[in-house]
Amino acid sequence: MLKRVLIANRGEIALRIIRTARKLGIETVAVASEPDLGMPYTRAADAVVPIGPGPANESYLVFDKIISAAKRTGADAIHPGYGFLAENADFAQAVTDAGLIFIGPTADSMRKLGGKAEAKAIAIAAGVPVVPGYQGEDQRPEILAEAARGIGFPVMIKAVAGGGGRGMRLVEREEDFAALLASAQREAEAAFGDPRVLIEKVVTAPRHVEVQVFGDSHGNVVHLFERDCSLQRRNQKVIEEAPAPGMSPELREKMTSAAVKLAKAVGYRGAGTVEFLVEGGALGAKAPWYLIEMNTRLQVEHPVTEEITGLDLVEWQFRVAAGEPLPLEQHQITCNGHAIEARLCAEDAAREFLPSIGRIVAFRTPTAEGLRVDAGVEAGSTVSPFYDSMIAKLIAKGPNRAVALERLKHALQETVVAGVKTNAAFLHGLLSLPAFESGEMDTGLIARELDRLNAKGSDPVAVAHGVIALIRQQQRKLEEQRRRISDEARSPWAALDGFQLGPSRKHSLDILVEGNKTTVEVSWVGGEPTVEVEGQVIQLQRDRVTTVDDGDRVFVLHNLRQTEVCWPTYDAAAADETDGEGQLRAPINGRVAKVFVEEGAVVDKGQRIVVIEAMKMEHVLVAPRGGTVGRLTAREGQQVTEGTVLAAILDS
Ligand code: ADP
Ligand code: ADP
Ligand code: MG
C-alpha cells in the first residue's frame, strides 16, 4: 500500500481524500497557497507545504512546486483531486518521471480521453454514439464558422480542454458566432491554457446522464451505475443524483456497457466518468443518446455513487494506484436506495450568482439520518477570490428518491452560513420544483424557472430582526459602558436607549440594508419592539429567523436567504451610490479581460462594454443605457476590485 500521499488540491476535496487516507493508514501532505494556510484541510493533514501566492497559476498549477513538495516530504504518490491538475496529462507524466505515483489514469489514456475531441474520435471508433459536430484540428475562425453553418444553428461551441461548463457558448444565430467564438477561446485559454474548441449540434431537452467507471492495471474495468446531473446552470452541475430517475433498464444497459467499452479501448486505470446526453427529457429504451465527454478523474458528485453502492471511491483509487486489482467484480456491485447531492456555493443567487467573497462568520450544518456533509470551510474561513465558490456538498440518502429529497431539503433549512451569501434558497427552491420532484427534467429546467426561483428585493422580516439585533447590540455596549463609569456620571440622559422610557415613542432610524440606506420606525410597547419597514408593521418570526452578530453588523438568515444590516457608514463609495446611474462598476474582484469600446464611443443600451474575468468565469458588463462612453478607466489586463467604476455612460 501507499505510505504517504500528497494532495495537490484544497478545500472540501482535500479533506475528503484525507479521510480515506487516514482510514487506510496512509499519511497525508497538504499544499496550500497563502490565502489557504490555516484552512481546515491544512490542519487535518499530517503535514502542510506552503506553495506561494493565491492565484492558482502561481501555486496549485505549478508542477515544480507540487512535485518538489512531494519529494521533500517523502510522499510516494500524488492525488490531484478534481479541477486544477487532475486532467493534465503533462502533469501526470511529470509526476511519473519524478519517480512518484500519480493517482489517476496514465498520461497516455488522459491524452486519448481527456480532450473532448480525442474522446469523441475514440468513441466513434468503438461504436459509441457521439453528438454530431466538428472536432477537427484546424482552428481557423472561418473553418469553424463553416463547420457551424454545416451543422446548422443553433450550435454549441465547446473548449476541447473544457470542464465545469467553462469555455462553452450556445450560439443561436449565425451573426453572433464570431464574437462568441472569440469569447469562448479567451475563457478556454484563461482556464485551461488551451484555446482549442469544437462545434456541436445542440441536443434538445437533454438529460445529462453519466456513468462512473473504474479500471485497474490488470485490464479489469467495471461500472458503478449512473448519475443524473440534469440540474445545471450555465452548463454547470448544481444538483446530482443516483440512480437516474426513470432510467429504463434497456438504456442503462446500453450506456453502462458503452462506458466500459470506451474505458477498455484505452486500457483505462482508476476512476473515470463517461458523460452522455439523452435527447428529449425521458430515459426510455428508445431515447437517442450521445457521448459528450469523459472526465479522467474523480468527480465532484462522486458521493452519490458512494452512497448507493456503499463503496469508497477514493479507497479504490488508492488501491488501484498501488497496483492492486479492483476490489469487486461487476456482478458484486449493487445499487441500493437513492442519493441526491446539492452543491452549496458562496454566491449571490439574486445578483446573477456572483461569487460572494469574504469571511464566513458562522457555519453550521446539521447531523441527521442519511445525511452526509462534505465541507471545506468552517466559521472563520475566508472565501477568497482565487478559487471555485463551492464551500460544501450536502448529500442525502434514503431508501427511495422521495425520502432522500425530503432529507436534503430539511438539511438545507437547518444549515447556517453567515458572512457570505450562499445559494441555499436557490437549491431548496430547485428541490421543491414539481418537475424535479416528479423526475421530469432536462438541462434547461433551471433557466426556465430562474425568475421564480430567485427571490429578489429586500426581505422586510429580516430587516426588522436585524434592526432589533442592532439595537440590542448597542444596548449591551451602553450597559457595559455604564458599568464602567462612576455613579455620578451615570445619568439617564446620557444613555441613548430611550426605547423603554415611553410606551408609545416611535424612533425613526436610518440603517443600511445590504449597503442601501433604509429608514425604519421602531417603537417599544411593554418591552416588546414593533418595527415598521416601508410603512408596514412587521410580524416578527423568531423561530424562523437566525441572527448572527459580527462586530457592528448583523447577518439575518430567513427563508435560507441572508440580509446584512448595519448602522450607516459615511464612506465615499456608499455616498457615490446615488449618482451611480449610467456607471459601470466591477461586480467582483477580478481582471479586465476585454474592453470593447473607446472613450467617446456612442453605445446602445445593452451593448457590451467590458469583460471581467474572475473565478475562471467571464462576466460581461453591458451599457445600462444608451449614450456616450466617458470616464473609461478599464484597461485590459488590469486587476480591479469590486465596486471600482470602470466607465460611465453619459448622455450623448
Ligand atoms: P464540461 O467539460 O464543461 O463539463 P460538457 O461537454 O460535459 O462540458 O457539457 C456540460 C453540459 O453542457 C452538459 O451537461 C449539457 O448540459 C451541456 N451541453 C454540452 N454539450 C451540449 C450539446 N451538444 N447540446 C446541448 N447541451 C450540451
Ligand atoms: P465535475 O465535472 O466533477 O462535476 P466540474 O466540471 O464542475 O466538476 O469541475 C470540476 C471542479 O473542480 C469544480 O467544480 C471545482 O470544485 C473544482 N475546481 C475547478 N477549478 C477550481 C479552482 N480554481 N479552485 C478550486 N477548485 C476548482
Ligand atoms: Mg462535463
Image: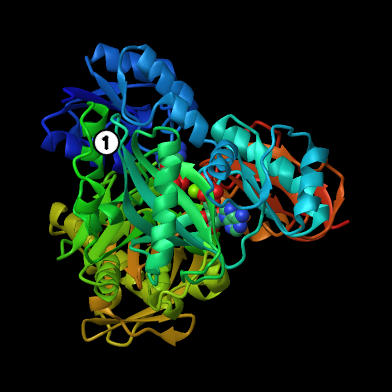
Image-quadrant location for residue 500: bottom left
Q: Position of residue 199 (x, y in %)?
A: 68, 47
Element carrying mark 1: helix
Left or right relative to 91: residue 555:
left
Q: Position of residue 365 (x, y in %)?
A: 22, 58
Left or right relative to 637: residue 40:
left
Residue depicted at x 26% and y 28%: 321
Residue 188 vs 49, above or below: the answer is below
| Residue 133 shows up from this direction | yes
Quarter holding ligand 2: top left
Confirm or reject: label 1 Cβ below 8 Å from ligand 2: no
**Is residue 575 or residue 179 the one in the foreground?**
179
Q: Position of residue 427 (x, y in %)?
A: 40, 66
| Residue 357 shows up from this direction | no
Residue 495 vs 346, above or below: the answer is below
**Where's the C terminus, which quadrant?**
bottom right
Q: Amino acid at mark 1?
A: Gln
**Is residue 41 or residue 473 the one in the foreground?**
41
**Where's the N terminus, which quadrant?**
top left
Residue depicted at x 41% and y 27%: 60
Q: Position of residue 253 (x, y in %)?
A: 39, 59
Residue 568 vs 533, above or below: the answer is above
Residue depicted at x 60% and y 39%: 117
Residue depicted at x 35% and y 73%: 559
Colour scheme in use: rainbow
Residue marked by disc 1: 317
Residue 553 vs 195, above or below: the answer is below
